[in-house]
Image: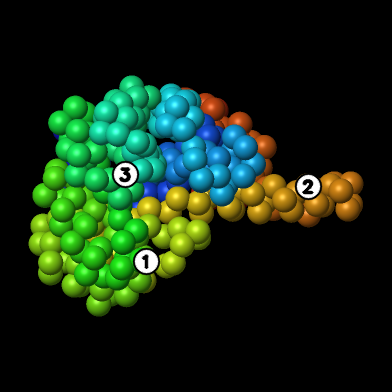
């Protein structure tokens, strides 16, 4: 069974952090995450230094995803597919290319019924999270109707971007009983309902995405290190991962304990 479908069929909330290269994916695995996410904004930032690029080719995302597989150790990867590109065949081809790159699920934004049907039919082993931005332009009722259409067309879960309150999430759940819900807590958009995981789970939420948190944290830390070197000629004052912890990341699990013994928490500092 598809690993993301396992998570979506469960009863708990899984937090899915964004990754953007093999090192960030390694850190996510070490932190114990059960799934990770590759966002097109992260790919644009890493490859072009511009996170606001409107169009990121599917080939760039699948190429980046292919570099993550060796370090993910079976942790499933979800990836941004944008609008699935121009035609139903383009959408199916995108899904199949993602699958070959090791991607278990994709987030498809506001697809039409033909696109979604083609994807479900031609790439049945890829889990589909159908995202809609209808809330921002037409309100909650329009977002609910779009999500209902996606669930009927075969999407594994829906992501109603823009929903911000528990009351709105409750209305969505009442209108779509049994449909798994995915939320995104991205710094690029409005905050999702700030409820405890137990409450979110009761309202049908199964995944919460954190697409850019690690990327922005890494950018902030790197910026501080570069500034310190420019101003002071050294980065000793900047909080950094110890070298021993960094090199321990490349040690196989079965030999790590015998070769490097670190105090708890040092992988994160």
Number of numbered discs overlaid on the protein picture = 3
Q: Which tag, 2 or 3, sits closer to the chain's start? A: 3
**Residue of label 2:** 226
Q: Is residue 260 visible?
A: no
Asked which secondary structure carries label 3, the reply is strand
Name the foreground residue: 31 vs 189.
189
The percent position of residue 184, horizontal first and vertical second, equals 37, 57
Q: How is the image coloured?
A: rainbow
**Residue of label 3:** 108
Mark nearest the camera among 1 and 2 is 1
Mark nearest the camera among 1 and 3 is 1
The percent position of residue 136, horizontal first and vertical second, equals 37, 66
Asked which secondary structure carries label 2, the reply is helix
Q: Which tag, 1 or 2, sits closer to the chain's start? A: 1
Quadrant of image for the N terminus: top left
The percent position of residue 229, horizontal first and vertical second, equals 84, 47
**Residue of label 1:** 136
Badge 1: few (under 14), some or many (20 or more) residues near its Cα, within 10 Å?
A: some
Determine the CA span between mark 2 and mark 3: 37 Å
């Amino acid at each position: 069974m598809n690993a993301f479908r396992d998570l979506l069929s469960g009863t708990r909330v899984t937090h899915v952090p964004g990754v953007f290269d093999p090192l960030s994916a390694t850190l996510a695995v070490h932190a114990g995450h059960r799934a990770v996410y590759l966002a097109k904004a992260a790919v644009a930032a890493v490859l072009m230094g511009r996170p606001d690029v409107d169009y990121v080719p599917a080939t760039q995302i699948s190429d980046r995803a292919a570099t993550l597989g060796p370090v993910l150790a079976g942790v499933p990867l979800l990836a941004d597919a944008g609008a699935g590109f121009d035609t139903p065949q383009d959408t199916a081809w995108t899904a199949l290319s993602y699958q070959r790159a090791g991607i278990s699920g994709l987030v498809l934004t506001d697809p039409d019924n033909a696109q979604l049907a083609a994807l479900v039919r031609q790439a049945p082993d890829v889990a589909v999270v159908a995202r809609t931005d209808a809330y921002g332009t037409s309100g909650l009722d329009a977002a609910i109707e779009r999500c209902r259409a996606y669930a009927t067309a075969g999407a594994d879960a829906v992501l109603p971007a823009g929903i911000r309150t528990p009351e709105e999430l409750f209305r969505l759940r009442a209108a779509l009983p049994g449909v798994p819900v995915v939320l995104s807590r991205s710094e690029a958009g409005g905050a999702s309902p700030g409820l405890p995981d137990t409450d979110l789970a009761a309202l049908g939420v199964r995944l919460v995405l954190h697409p850019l948190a690690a990327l922005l944290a890494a950018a902030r830390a790197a910026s501080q290190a570069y500034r310190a070197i420019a101003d002071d000629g050294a980065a000793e004052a900047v909080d950094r991962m110890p070298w021993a912890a960094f090199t321990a990341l490349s040690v196989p699990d079965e030999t790590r304990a015998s070769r490097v013994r670190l105090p708890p928490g040092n992988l994160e500092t």
